[in-house]
Image (spheres, rainbow, N blue to C red):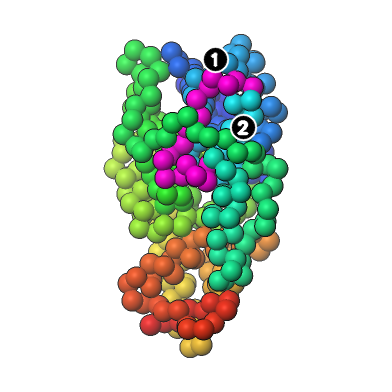
Amino acid sequence: MELYPNVYQIGSLYGGRNLFQYLFVGDNVVLVDTGTADTPEKTIFPFLDKLKIKPEQLTLAVTTHADLDHQGGNDSIKSLSPRTMLSCGEADRELVEDPSKLYDLRYNFLKQEHDVSIDPVPSPEAGKLRHMDLCFTGGEKIHLGDDWYLEVLHVPGHSRGHLALYDPRKRALFSGDAVQGRGCPEASGKMALPVTYYHIDSYLSTIRYFEHLPVEVLYSGHWPIMHGEEIRDFLAESRRTVEFADRAILQSLAKAPAGLTMKELIEAVASAMGDWPEENWIFAMFPIKGHMDRLEQHGKVKPVPGTRPARWALA
Ligand SMILES: [Zn+2]
């Protein structure tokens, strides 16, 4: 779908959710996100073909952040078009390059202490090890034409190195999964996944940063296209969700003097949220760990010594 001249949204479904990549066709041809391992072959290259763009004309692929549905296609892009430069945020580099690190350090990092994890070994959807040709830290400009460039923004919270791209000409923001409202919807609109932010203060800074950026239209990794008021509502809802989760955690700990495990906290927060589907509650381990780290720093909760899986109690 053409969003505005020479800018396209490429869409497919992944687990019932929309999965979007974006394509900018100028002096450079820039792809934002590469999907899962088979997205290039099944969706991206056929889309390019319809525009009469050959894979080798792709100048740059930017992975917004370390997750298999955004980086999995990197290997496939590079295999078919070796001169396309692969890139991501510097702080996500290790995880974007290597699926086994993505699983060990991101998806399964709470397994030992908290007995929560996703899949033990990388799914083929996560793609293969591929090195990045360049990494961004935010503030760079990607040239597309006379008076046309994309600004690279560093917008951490969901991951440390999360990037967004901003087209000042159209006041269009391409945000990946940097802000998440109350969670990720299915294409039908029904809630699919809990929020998966992790670094709470960075996430709140990213929300505030977006609120101060002149944005007329928001294009994300999975959410519907939003304009004007809808963007402000989405950002406000993203912040309210953080505040709600924080309160739900403290309220459930207040009723549990012996403390709660990660699984018990997931159940408490997810039940309080109401519309996260139970089969995906596990993904709430990311924000809850983030909240617990921050609450501990603020002296509000403390780990209960000698417990495994670990428990937290009010301080
Ligand atoms: Zn995503």
Residue 230 visible from this viewpoint = no
Q: Position of residue 269 (x, y in %)?
A: 53, 69
Secondary structure beneath disc 2?
helix
Question: Quarter-wise, where is residue 250 in the image?
Answer: bottom left
Identify whether 117 is placed above or below 83: below
Residue 64 visible from this viewpoint = yes
Secondary structure beneath disc 1?
helix
Residue in view at x 33 percent, y 30 percent: 140
Residue tagged 1: 57
Q: Describe residue 79's horizontal placement relative to residue 197 as left or right.
A: right
Residue in view at x 59 percent, y 26 percent: 78
Q: Describe residue 28's horizontal placement relative to residue 271 as left or right.
A: left
Identify whether 76 is placed above or below 267: above
The amino acid beneath tag 1 is Gln
Q: Which of 289 and 5 is in front in this view?
A: 289
**Which part of the image, by quadrant, shows the N terminus?**
top right
Residue in view at x 46 percent, y 44 percent: 92
